Amino acid sequence: MGPDHHSAVEEHGEYLPGPVPGTPLVSKEDDKKPAAPSEQAERQEGDYSIYTLSEKWVIVSMASLAALFSPLTANIYLPAIPTIATAFDKSIELINLTVTVYMVLQGVAPMFWGTLADRLGRRPAFLACLLVLSAACTGLALVPTSDYWLLMFLRCTQAAGSASTVALGAGVIGDIATRAERGGFFGLFALGPQFGPTFGPVIGGALAQTVGWRWIFWFLCILSAACFVAMLTFLPETLRRLVGDGSAIPSKIYRPLIPLVGRGRQNTGVDLPPPPPLSNPLRILTYLDVMNLLVFNGILYSIFYAVTATISTLFQSTYPFLNEIDIGLCFLAIGGGTIIGGLVTGKLLDRDYRLMKEKIAREASASAEDPARPDDATKDDNFPIERARMRVVPLHLIAYTVCCASYGWCLEKKVSMAAPLVLQIVLGISGIAVMNSVQTLLIDLLPAQGSSVSACNNLVRCSLGAATVSVIDLSLNALGTGWTYLLLGGISLATMPMIWFAVWVGPRCQAERRARQDNAT
């Protein structure tokens, strides 16, 4: 089996192992009878993983817990910037550089960890990231105030450890969940990353004001160390190259100390494919359909980040009666919206997938005499996954655009504070609905490279986010709040054709990747 074969499988395919141990064999007589489409679909999806639905929820919950550290370490730090500037006797601009370098590493680090996780396993990558994060937080809690360079270095190290956990979690979902389940699991998984923007500023402000800024990092150190112990104890390896559908028993380093899931359904006789060659994850950026989705998602994320990054300054200038804790509480509106949106969107994605699959099966049954035809029409190779995932995204995008434009003018006209807070909630719901839909589709397109494609997503959106944040203050000063957010709303609306392009070009790009895979084998 040559390297071309490995490359093709890594590019497109999912490893599908043999029958789950203990599954009864089908007799020849039964094999001759064509199964109903729904039965065949259930059989195919049931063989994807040995884990029960409740066990999958447990695994995704653990991944979500680890993923909260990426945004939490970024947002919990923000309220303490003036205090840290005073402690280090540096200007606010110099301390803000620690935020900039954090964002740079936040975009770059997942490219390294995600690639390793797709090759060496999710569990070791999770543990290594949490260990680096905990060590960096310890250093930050003890850093001398005379060593500004050390503060900068440790913030980079902190980002290198925390930023990759989101990409690793996306890879876990691709390992254990079928297309019919991924929407709901991404909805649950998104709760962890949304915790940071929602509660991070509140926690950081409270700690800095009561017990001092160093306790922000002690808090993160304790929390990340506890998460490390929990994952070391309970998290199983899910990378399909190492464990197949979960039934293969990996080496000891990949096994949890206390196996909570999959017990009694594993054996050592499962055939696994050879390891793929270590590849450059940036090659994913050459896929037209994937790059279109990455840019679309990155533009909307950068606008979303511009809103959150200016909440403190805009609310303080518009409503001067607010104190620091009050302003921190204002972040709960947009954060709460993202939590609601993540949960609702996950269920809607699963529902849309199921309804479209049933519709296609019905249409195929009505137009074909061959009983196997409906099942062929709903197979992954033939299923219009882009249409299923992006069906309601235009509606979310319109709501996102309207809220963004209205938000700026509410602040410009200094209306009641309730108005921009309500718009923040709707903005959070619609924004996370679009971003979760795109993230789920990206995993659907390249399930064997779940962590790598999520790392590419993180690289593009963090790059665009950093660029937007770097000019947002200039725009606010030059154009004013109302016109700035009207401009951002117009930019978001201008991305609408990218949704239709994704639906049109996606099946063609997938067919090309399958053709390359077939030629390689």
Image: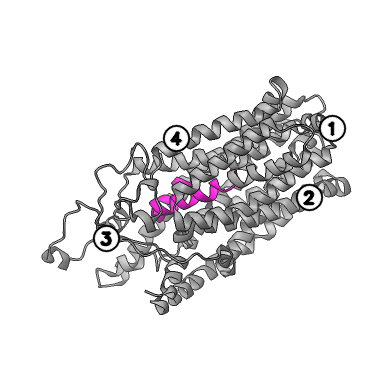
Q: Residue 313 sits in which quadrant?
A: top right
Inspect the image, locate mark 2, and give the three-letter code of the amino acid beneath it: Ser
Q: Secondary structure at mark 2?
A: helix
Q: Quadrant of the N terminus?
A: bottom left
Inspect the image, locate mark 1, and give the three-letter code of the amino acid beneath it: Asp
Spatial CA span between label 4 and label 2: 38 Å
Inspect the image, locate mark 3, and give the three-letter code of the amino acid beneath it: Gly
Q: Residues within 10 Å of mark 2 (few under 14, many from 20)?
A: few
The residue segment tinted magenta is 162-187
**Which of marks 2 and 4 precedes in the sequence?**
4
Q: Determine which residue is flagged by label 3.
A: 18
Residue reaching furthest to the top: 210
Q: Determine which residue is flagged by label 2.
A: 470
Residue at 47% in and 42% down? 63
Choose mark 3 or mark 4, whichever is in front.
4
Whether residue 438 appears in this view of the structure is no
Which x, y percent locates residue 201?
67, 32
- Label annotation for residue 230: 4
Residue reaching furthest to the right: 478
Please indicate whether residue 151 sits to the left or right of residue 40 in the image. right
